[in-house]
Amino acid sequence: MKLLLFLLTNSIIYASSYPNFTKNELKKFTGHSGIITKNRVLDYAKSVDSFKKLPKQNQLISVNHYLNQLPHKTDMLNNKQSDYWETPKEFLTCGYGDCEDYAIIKYFTLLKLGFSKDKLFITTAFEKYTGQYHMVLSYFEEEDKPPLVLDNLSYKVLDLKKREDLKADIFISPAGTYKLDNFNKLIKVDKVPEKFIDLLERVKKES
């Protein structure tokens, strides 16, 4: 029975798309903190696999809720530099992240579940309660309607119109940088930001 569970768990890890960890990567997690990291990685893979049987709306809620449970830590404390965008594998390895790191891992987790990258946008927004800029993930479920927002500050997945605390600024995808007009249409305003290009290059090296 233990062997069967081991094989099932490993098949989840090694057969899935990014982010996934190889056997050699898992072997590198040693000591007390290494065991915690390994368990976190295995639990992520098992949980995401369980989400596959859910309807799309429930997948959004489950992904947002599950990843919001990972502890928050600012970039300066976590990476000793400001505004560092962690790859999902970096986030899962260290176990901490800033708002952009939650948005990024949710982006790749939804891609892993089969969501279209054309509907997913890393989004910067002004958060009126903190008075600071914030980053979330937007999912444009339907054309000409406000996107659904996955946010590490909220366990609810609501459309942007209902998020009165957020004022969206720019929407980022591998195709470019966009603004949202009054009719919920995305208007391209710039090329892909260098930070997102750098992130995608690091993800490619990890894949």
Image (cartoon, rainbow, N blue to C red):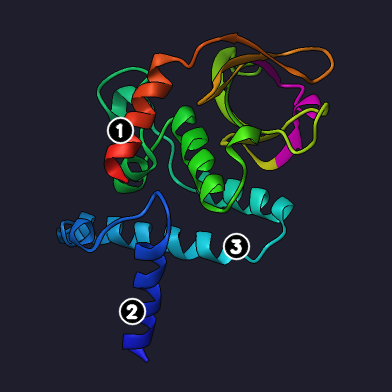
Q: Earlier in the sequence, mark 3 or mark 1?
A: 3
The amino acid type of the residue labelled 1 equals: Arg
**How many numbered markers are drawn?**
3
The residue tagged 3 is 52
The residue tagged 2 is 6
Mark 2: secondary structure:
helix
Which residue does the image show at 38% across and 27% down from the upper left? 74
Q: Earlier in the sequence, mark 1 or mark 2?
A: 2
The residue tagged 1 is 202
The amino acid type of the residue labelled 2 equals: Phe
Mark 1: secondary structure:
helix
Which residue does the image show at 33% across and 30% down from the upper left? 201
Between marks 1 and 2 in the image, the one whose residue lies nearer the viewer: 1
Asked if disc 3 and disc 2 are in contact, CB closer than 8 Å, the reply is no
- The crowding category of the residue bearing disc 2, from other C-alpha atoms within 10 Å (few below 14, some 14 to 19, many at least 20), is few
The amino acid type of the residue labelled 3 equals: Lys
Cα distance in 3D space between marks 1 and 2: 30 Å
Q: Is 81 situated above or below 58?
A: above
